[in-house]
Image (cartoon, coloured by chain):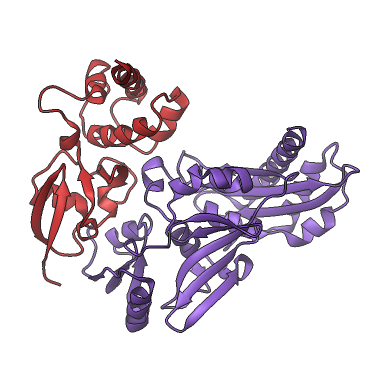
Amino acid sequence: MSKLPIRLTVNGDSHEVSVEPRKLLSDVLREDLRLTGTHVGCEHGVCGACTVLVDGAPTRACLIFAIQMEGREITTVEGLTPAEGLSPLQQALHEEHGLQCGFCTPGIVTTFEAYLRENPDPTEADIREVLAGNLCRCTGYQNIVRAIGKAAKAMREGATT
Amino acid sequence: MKPAKFEYHKPETLEEALALLAEYGDEARIIAGGQSLVPMMNMRLAQPAHLVDINNIEGLSYIRANNGSLEIGALTRHRQVEESSLLVQACPPMPAAARNIGHYGLRARGSIGGSLALADPSAEFPLMAMLLNAEISTRSAVGARSILARDFFVSVFTTTLEPGEIVTQVSLRALGQSEGWGFRWLARRSGDYAIVNAAATLALNGAGQIDRISLALGGVGATPLRLSQLEQESRGKAVGGDWAREIAAQAAAQIDPESDKNASAEFRKELIEVLLAAALEDALRRMEGRMAA
């Protein structure tokens, strides 16, 4: 089947692209829109590296077709990064050495942007439960857990001042 | 790891979707959350010629009480089941089951209708459908059906759904005021399908004997099982001593699970005993908690 024109809203910008219906959102983001912050690991929903936000909800971009996303608001890790500096979550991952190779990091940032909005004061057990959906082969997770706890605290304090 | 070609359809109404399904028959697959279908398409285990996307159909996503039953629309996401205060109050096993499905990011997208239609024998919602006397409502171009869970699940990944038929709703019984419940499972990693899962409800009479009990098991056969005969035999039994362990041992004696790469038959039998006993003890504890409250 030939390509069809679709309109996608990504990080607030509207894009017209021509894609085959079978093209995954992860591939359209990377290949057609050149937003390579969304990483593609397992391509069957296990690793979590390609997680983006769809209307604010964390979604595996490899488990959805771009053509399904017309009329939805997509947010990638690029859209969560301020023009200057880093987001509180990114800053905490940096400070706590929450990454080595960085392959899994964009999916962790997007997932926890959504989660900390729902649960701004998570326990360590809450963080570990949610983090179980994102595979990291470098860190052993300890520093990621610490970073997310630190970011949550910083975001709570930022919200009250 | 890229899906094969397909033609994409985005119906706006149920009637449109049913017409498409009638036209394309078994060449068509419905996509709801896609959290099981798309991995299968990426690995080319599924290669539908037509994909009918039901995500834009309104009126398929709701959780409501109706005459002592709870009705959940087929497109309701796992996260909505998990977070529903109505279900937490009237049917607490459902949010507990939802919370155990996959991971946070998958639960935002996966749908209850999709989980039931997939019919994985160790999945959470099929188990709960058996436990809570679910009635599954369907529509097709030729009419509507209401199917009891025990008739719905036929085998591994196989239901009584016909080509062209779509799940629209599942209706479950509410738990009584003095009824307790338990849900236990064993999986090797957080988010995996259970090797075995077990669920129970329990209500006692004034003499401290079992008045109403329901027992369901997943991962021990081609479909989730409801142990109706054992439930009958357990009525009138006093809850004391090793009561939960005794019922669970009887369950294990009646079931012949198969061995596979995840677990041997012997291990599964042992899990039936351990998990069902723990689910029953949880049910008693929660029942006492509700009575005391």
In the rendering, at what x and y percent does residue B36 appear?
A: 38, 57
Residue at x 58%, y 71% (from the top left corner): B147
**Is any part of residue B122 visible from this angle?**
no
| Left or right position of B175 against A22 | right
Q: Colour of chain B?
A: purple
Q: Quadrant of the C terminus of chain B?
A: top right
In the rendering, at what x and y percent does residue B163 appear?
A: 42, 78
Q: Identify the image quadrant of residue B132.
A: bottom right
Picture layout, residue B56 above or below residue B6: above
Q: How many marks?
A: 0
| Left or right position of B91 against A51 | right
| Left or right position of A37 against B100 | left
Q: Which chain is rendered red in the image?
A: A
Residue at x 54%, y 51% (from the top left corner): B124
Q: Quadrant of the N terminus of chain B?
A: bottom left
Residue at x 57%, y 47% (from the top left corner): B87
Picture layout, residue B142 above or below residue B118: below
In the rendering, at what x and y percent does residue A106 appear?
A: 23, 35
> In front: A13, or B132?
A13
Picture layout, residue B35 above or below residue A135: below
